[in-house]
Amino acid sequence: MDLSLTETQQLIQDSTRDFVRNDFAKEILLDLDEMPALMTSELWTKVSQLGWMGMAIPEEYGGTGNTLTDVAVLYEELGRGPVPGPLFSSGVLGALILLKTANSSQKEAWLPGIADGSRILAVAATEKHYGWSPAHIAMTARRNGEDYVLDGTKLFVHDAASATDLLVLAKSESGISLLRVDANADGIAIRVLPGFLSGVTEVTFENVRVPSSDLVGIEGAAWAGYDAALQSAIPVLCAYKVGACQALFELCVDYSKERTQFGQPIGKFQRVQDHIIHIVNYLDAARWTTNEALWKLDTGQDAASSVHMAKALSSDGYLRSCDFAHEVHAGIGVMREYGLTLHTKMSRSLYHCLGAPKFHRKRMEGALGLVQA
Amino acid sequence: MDLSLTETQQLIQDSTRDFVRNDFAKEILLDLDEMPALMTSELWTKVSQLGWMGMAIPEEYGGTGNTLTDVAVLYEELGRGPVPGPLFSSGVLGALILLKTANSSQKEAWLPGIADGSRILAVAATEKHYGWSPAHIAMTARRNGEDYVLDGTKLFVHDAASATDLLVLAKSESGISLLRVDANADGIAIRVLPGFLSGVTEVTFENVRVPSSDLVGIEGAAWAGYDAALQSAIPVLCAYKVGACQALFELCVDYSKERTQFGQPIGKFQRVQDHIIHIVNYLDAARWTTNEALWKLDTGQDAASSVHMAKALSSDGYLRSCDFAHEVHAGIGVMREYGLTLHTKMSRSLYHCLGAPKFHRKRMEGALGLVQA
Amino acid sequence: MDFAIEDSAEQSTFREEVRVWLKENIPEGTEFPVDPGDLTLEQYEHRRELGRRLGDQSWLYPNMPTKYGGGDLPVEKVVILHEEMGRAGLSLPPYYDAGGRMAAPTILVWGSEEHKDRFLPEICKGRVRSWQLLTEPGAGSDLAGIKMTAIRDGKDYVLNGQKIFVGSSHGAEQSWTVVVTDPEGKRHHNLSWFMIPMDLPGITVVPMNLLTAGGEGGSGCGVKNTIFFDDVRVPAENLVGGENNGWKVATTHLEMEHGGAGRLGERGVIKEFIDYCQDEHHGHNLLESAEARETLVDLYIESEVTRLFAIRNYWMAHNNHPRSYEGSQYSLRRKLSGLDIAEKILEIAGPYALTNDEQYGPLKGALELYGREAITALHPGATTDIQRVIMSRRIGIGRQDREKVGALR
Amino acid sequence: MDFAIEDSAEQSTFREEVRVWLKENIPEGTEFPVDPGDLTLEQYEHRRELGRRLGDQSWLYPNMPTKYGGGDLPVEKVVILHEEMGRAGLSLPPYYDAGGRMAAPTILVWGSEEHKDRFLPEICKGRVRSWQLLTEPGAGSDLAGIKMTAIRDGKDYVLNGQKIFVGSSHGAEQSWTVVVTDPEGKRHHNLSWFMIPMDLPGITVVPMNLLTAGGEGGSGCGVKNTIFFDDVRVPAENLVGGENNGWKVATTHLEMEHGGAGRLGERGVIKEFIDYCQDEHHGHNLLESAEARETLVDLYIESEVTRLFAIRNYWMAHNNHPRSYEGSQYSLRRKLSGLDIAEKILEIAGPYALTNDEQYGPLKGALELYGREAITALHPGATTDIQRVIMSRRIGIGRQDREKVGALR
């Protein structure tokens, strides 16, 4: 048993923390928040050069082949921002899906670009009947000559507005298939949805022709690999939320010392203390379930119930930590320039991404053997 | 709109409060708690003479025919004790079931005795497969000549140890039937269950012969009337829990002033305040949903969703109010002689009685039209 | 006990009267924008017009004495007015007016006859709109710690300072505020309460950039503002309740703001959401999911308890029933249960709950707004922490003396 | 990061050694009664015997230095000892012994060499059982407000006062306590820490009548007692850590008691309950109900988080990793999540959860006991409120200086 970070991880943590503090300072994040892509090309170039996009990709495909725990250490720091944009969608979720589903020539063709940041993936899975089960995939990929033809709508797709490539789940004749599609292909329209979310889009496909060479892996057999990739990607997303909760915690502790009311720092009041204690309890529950899930995945153990648990706790925890942070901050917290609402919005945006807490709790019934899987 | 008590209700409240304060003082309740019947014959005679047992029974059957709200005012005061024993089982639940299911000669034969306290009912509905739906009735009443024969076990039956008569739900050939059975009939064994509950029993029936004149109402058609009686009885039980929460609230407020730690009354600490605020919030949620349910029933309106809501909130509220009262009291709260644990045990004992919160929340789906009823 | 808000014959007649009148008098295009920040000047002016018409009927502040232009109506008729305005998609008063809702009752308790005659009719008749100016950057929960000063100079007081989280869009004719009149004075004994014409020189209004534009009131009031006072001269006769007595005066409107008077007919979005769930949207029904049904029941129960607390408080206030912690209990509940309900909606409706997209945003985007407002609503009219402070004092937790409620009449 | 508590070759050998040894050395009939209050004298003596045998192996307090009879074992082997004892249905040490668990490390930090030589070996070898005496009727949360006095008189201190919620059944040879040695002294600077032989004249032990007999420790310890001290003369050399320095000494064992050292292998009843749910009982399976399955998942998650906090703390403490709020966070969680789990069990199992009836009580009545203990466990080792106080101080909420943790070594 050794729950400390490795030296590599400590290095990733320190350097990322510095970078995020400077290059994703609050004023920059407030600006990014108003851009559809949630990212500037300058920043994208920088983070790509730092190697962030290739961490989850093996060396043979141009990455650095780090462990999931290593990757999670990076994303925990990004969550502190919260740094928006397509980093996770492309470098983790998209990359892992390709690793689990694509054939080797596809991997060779696509992964190096992801690793160097020139190719940016977004994963178009969910639809109007929203959900993360195969039953929620209704869009069809119809075979037509050498091509597949896509028609329909993908909804609540994260980060499509900044993507070069879309990974699209669709029903083909033999089952659920995955296709790589140029994001600017004819017939595709990407629309960022307005509201209390960021980077979430509607993607419509109208008679979009995809050459069969862009069918990822084997036709009709995408789900198992896709789902396995999700299981690996989820704890990295959890780590992002852990970092976010950590940032909220620190923000609140700082504010508890600075803000005075009734002649004393507000943190002297037990009620304010209790709001912050709620946050640290959510934080640590998310942190340690996430850490254990990562460890299980990195060591090849059955991680299903740990992954579900981590996702349920981190999504709930991030949402509620924002609520408690607002209790601590009151008025100043809802002023946009203060920065707290960046987290509030992100916690909502990511709440359902890769499955909401209730979905994962439900899936735990199977993982724990309470129902026939 | 007028949310005040009527003069009659005010009178009931005042006189009952006095009586409970004196005749069911803490020392007496601690003694009663150790008796299987949870009641002495002296006290039973007294409360019968006060007319408590006849309040829910119409004048024509020897009662005073009060409204349910009147009856609830009485039970709210009993809950403050908490006064244990078969009062509710006999005078409310049992009486209302007979009123809804028995034929007029049965009513004439049985209700006056209930009203004057000479006859004490307990309702034997639940079984090993515990629950409050018709599907949970497995025990059979087999016709044999002029008699019915009962065999099987009723489990978690409240107040059977002090009853003279049992109202037994059983499956007969044509459906679910209700039978009145002498509690000391041959073949019946009543056993009080030990543990963190009070007055809850196992009742076994071994070849118990019941004359067909003791079949209540019409064979096989008991459920509808029984269930309607439960809907009316539930808010009275809720009122009992409201009174209990009120007592817990007052106990905690008093203790918050008396007990000093760190040189000041503990109630000066916000955390202690918040425990008590939780209690008053549970209390008032239970109180006003209960009041509205009673009003709907007394005025002949559809009360289903109000009744379910009141039961869910009052059962949860009583349980959790005890928890918070223990937080306020710490060590002294778990000392038996202090009296708080009488409530703690009662809140558990009554948690599932007439259906646990989840059961009633589930039934609300039908009441609100979210599913086909 | 009688929860019925059903109509007697007289009430039915009144309801019919109101209904006919509203039909004739609500200007076209008065309806709320979904997001308060979107309130147009035209919509605003329609509402002002409706407000004046209601005022002429004495229906704008139906609880206020007739002497001052109110209706002095019994509870039942007030309820009818609320309900009928609600049916028309509006509230009473039909725009955010802290003057009528909170300053008017305060002036009634604390003002001189001259104050009442001067301020109340123009409020009750809907001729002026008044903003509430309380919070400052350094004084939120600790309202008594405000820094803005009003220093006597001849016939005037000269005001300097800054107030935040004020008002709404499109201006107001008046505002009322608590300011420091004795900078050396003892806490709680150094404040005074003023009515201030908003057209005085030296007042600057700057809109704030917030998570939601509105918040309090929930009636399409528009954006909140920061107000700067720079040597603003206010006539001394606008001081209400006596110099350095402002904290006591404030207890009255704080009692109102904290929910002491209850509210009726306020489950708008929640009820609409429950209805929304019953229908099919984008090809499926949310209630197919057992978890969604379960959560919806919980949400319904949450909202019912809030409704019952509101009714209770309303009845208590309007029957002069002794009150204690109930106002703050209701406010606390509205805040926490609002947040809880927003999260239950998020669970049931999924990410749809987060968008106000024309195509996908349920209830024309009202659900998305509800999610943001649940957060913004946590602090106005005092934080949840302060509501608990008030509850504790009034219950008498840890203290022999129970704090008295603010006078409502 | 490595959560594995898996065995290396060396550890496997050790585990096998332990297993064999335990098989040979656990006396027949040592198992816990379900309800701690039911601990018989015979069971108690069996455990004392086992304790002595473990002590002779240096396995009773495997973390303590070998010099004093401990095992000075690495974490992994300690874990193995815990696990193997757990497999045998016991815990380590096999009876409630606050002396070994908390006083011994405290003496290690604060005692003189003479204290260590005199007290530690007899504890580590299992020759004495020591009780903890802290709470008084007037001093629970406010431990520094105790009133019991120890007044120097010649070579002795003379003790007078009352301690409550003490110990277990069947007596102890020693106890340790904090008492007032300077009645006029400043708070926190007026206390001293003593080891007290329990056979001194003037000590009276009276069992308490509580909701549950035991509580803390959870290891079948029997009933708690009130202890009266009536002019009890304790030799001055039994004062540990210096006169009027008792509060500082206490921070060490309070840190232990508050969970700073973590715990391993403690999900007994919860795990058994989850298993119980998988089988049919009284003709049906609880998990047929969708609500029961849902609640069981929530319960499992609750218990997993508690387990992980315990592992984290254990790892931190045993690797001398900087700690701050984690001990109290774990204690807070154990308390609140215990209550929450008890109520989830109540929902899932129905009234069965409330009875310890031979026929109907699940897990031989352990479920019923769990429900009561969840309540009794709220206050020992400081209330949830106090745990939050400690967390806040150590996190530094509202303060520039962060309180330091109590020394564990």
Image (cartoon, coloured by chain):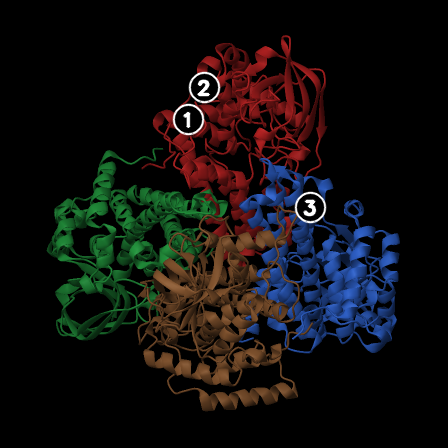
Chain colours: A blue, B green, C red, D brown
Residue bearing the label numbered 3 = A340
Residue C26 appearing in the image: yes
Q: Residue at x 49, y 24 (%)?
A: C20
Instruction: Please check whether the numbered discs 3 and 2 fall on a single chain.
Output: no
- Location of the C terminus of chain B by quadrant is bottom left
Residue C370 appearing in the image: no
Label 2: state its secondary structure: loop
Residue bearing the label numbered 1 = C77
In the image, which is nearer the foreground, mark 3 or mark 1? 3
Tag 1 near tag 2, CB within 8 Å: yes
Residue B257 horizontal/vertical position (percent): 39, 42
What amino acid type should be assigned to the residue bearing mark 2?
Gly
Left-right relation of B233 to C65: left
What amino acid type should be assigned to the residue bearing mark 1?
Lys
Question: Nearer the N terminus, badge 1 or badge 2?
Answer: 2
Q: Is residue A15 above or below residue C193?
A: below
* Mark 1 crowdedness (10 Å alpha carbons): few <14, some 14-19, many ≥20: many
Circle on res. C71: 2
Q: Residue at x 41, y 29 (%)?
A: C317
Q: Chain of mark 1?
A: C
Image quarter for residue B288? top left
Q: CA distance from mark 3 to mark 1?
A: 44 Å
Q: Chain of mark 3?
A: A
What amino acid type should be assigned to the residue bearing mark 3?
Leu
Residue A145 horizontal/vertical position (percent): 82, 71
